[in-house]
Image (cartoon, grey):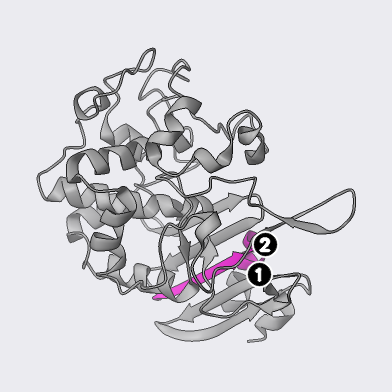
């Protein structure tokens, strides 16, 4: 199959295609450091935006299986926070499946520019999940909890706060111990933009006035939270899918719940931390995705054929269009 013909000349990032459990195509394009012309490599670590929600969801489900947490536990009981106008009876379940109605600090249904968040609240202040609180704590509920599905970033920040409250550890340290290390994901973590480790790609935003590019260091949280922001490689994402779907992280029963529609919206099915696309009568193809200024990421897995497609870009390229083309070629 000629995958090269499906990828535009301006693409920058990495692509990996696994068919029937074996590597079919892997290649890096463009530059991790554009001005210095340092190329992206297959082991380059890329930001993944909201895709990291799946890691938080898996960790929460582990705590539930361990008996430390319940899907029906409420934020009022779990977190000693003055919730003000926010419903204290919001449950862990509704946070996981985006039906909580909790005010979203970045409401993607009405806001288009993530960078606008930092005009009055500097992004360098965001180094812990608790640092997001001022961005939503004084807002009213978006709707009555449980009323409908609406994708919500705040919900996963609160889930990360719950992880921290129960475990007594920073959420990223807990994810490393319970998700990344067991899966062999040695190149995955939550890093601060002003202290990035080796092999991390800078993300670039197009300047419409000059036609050039600038980095996103003032456009996103300086460190990721439960809402997203993990850095990873395409190889580590493949390890995650393999580990998760083999039952190494969750029991088979809990795994099936995670990968089944949980939001009651058949037109936009979502499990726990994963998007779902209907693939058959009762089968769904799970995928994770993320988009931030200069960042685009998508990874899907077909459990029947043991095939996955992972595409990440540090120039915000249209990874979804490329994935659709690759799926068409693979069929």
143 sits left or right of 317 in the view: left
State the image coordinates of residue 232 (x, y, percent, origin top left).
Answer: 46, 66
Is residue 141 in the magenta section? no
Q: Is residue 55 above or below residue 127?
A: below
Q: Callout 2: helix, strand or loop?
A: helix
Image quadrant occupied by the N terminus:
bottom right
Q: Callout 1: helix, strand or loop?
A: helix
State the image coordinates of residue 167 (x, y, percent, origin top left).
Answer: 18, 46
- Viewer-nearest residue: 317 or 265: 317
263 sits left or right of 257 in the view: right
262 sits left or right of 182 in the view: right
- Viewer-nearest residue: 236 or 145: 236
Toward the right, the furthest residue is 210
Q: Is residue 5 above or below residue 322?
A: below
Q: Which residue is mark 2?
A: 321
- The tag on residue 325 is 1
Q: Residue at x 29, y 48 (%)?
A: 170
Q: How many other residues sit within 10 Å of disc 2, few (<14), some (14-19) or many (≥20)? A: few
Toward the top, the furthest residue is 85
Q: Is the residue under label 2 in contact with that under label 1 (CB below 8 Å)?
A: yes
Q: Residue at x 52, y 52 (%)?
A: 49
Q: Residue at x 50, y 39 (%)?
A: 125
Tell me how far mark 1 sits from mark 2, CA to CA: 6 Å
- Viewer-nearest residue: 100 or 138: 138
Q: Say if residue 70 shows up in the picture.
A: yes
Q: Say if residue 149 shows up in the picture.
A: no
Q: Where are the magenta residues, as a range?
A: 305-324
């Amino acid at each position: 199959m000629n995958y090269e013909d499906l990828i535009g000349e301006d693409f920058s990032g990495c692509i990996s295609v696994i068919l029937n459990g074996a590597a079919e195509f892997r290649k890096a394009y463009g530059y991790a450091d554009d001005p210095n012309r340092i190329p992206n490599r297959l082991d380059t670590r890329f930001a993944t935006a909201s895709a990291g929600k799946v890691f938080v969801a898996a960790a929460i489900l582990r705590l539930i299986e361990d008996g430390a947490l319940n899907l029906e536990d409420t934020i009022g009981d779990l977190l000693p926070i003055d919730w003000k106008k926010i419903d204290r009876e919001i449950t862990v379940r509704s946070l996981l499946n985006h039906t909580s109605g909790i005010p979203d600090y970045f409401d993607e249904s009405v806001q288009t520019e993530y960078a606008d968040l930092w005009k009055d609240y500097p992004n360098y202040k965001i180094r812990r999940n608790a640092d997001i609180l001022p961005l939503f704590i004084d807002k009213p509920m978006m709707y009555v909890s449980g009323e409908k599905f609406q994708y919500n970033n705040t919900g996963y920040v609160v889930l990360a706060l719950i992880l921290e409250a129960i475990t007594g550890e920073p959420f990223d340290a807990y994810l490393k111990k319970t998700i990344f290390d067991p899966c062999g994901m040695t190149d995955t973590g939550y890093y601060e933009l002003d202290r990035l480790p080796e092999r991390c790609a800078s993300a670039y935003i197009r300047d419409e006035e000059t036609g050039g590019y600038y980095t996103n260091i003032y456009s996103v949280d300086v460190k990721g939270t439960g809402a997203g922001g993990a850095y990873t490689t395409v190889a580590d994402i493949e390890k995650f899918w393999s580990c998760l779907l083999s039952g190494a992280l969750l029991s088979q029963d809990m795994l099936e719940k995670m990968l089944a529609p949980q939001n009651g919206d058949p037109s936009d099915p979502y499990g726990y931390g994963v998007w779902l696309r209907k693939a058959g009568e009762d089968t769904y193809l799970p995928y994770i995705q993320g988009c931030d200024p200069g960042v685009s990421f998508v990874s899907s897995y077909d459990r029947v054929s043991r095939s996955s497609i992972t595409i990440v870009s540090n120039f915000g390229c249209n990874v979804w269009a490329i994935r659709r083309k690759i799926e068409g070629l693979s069929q």
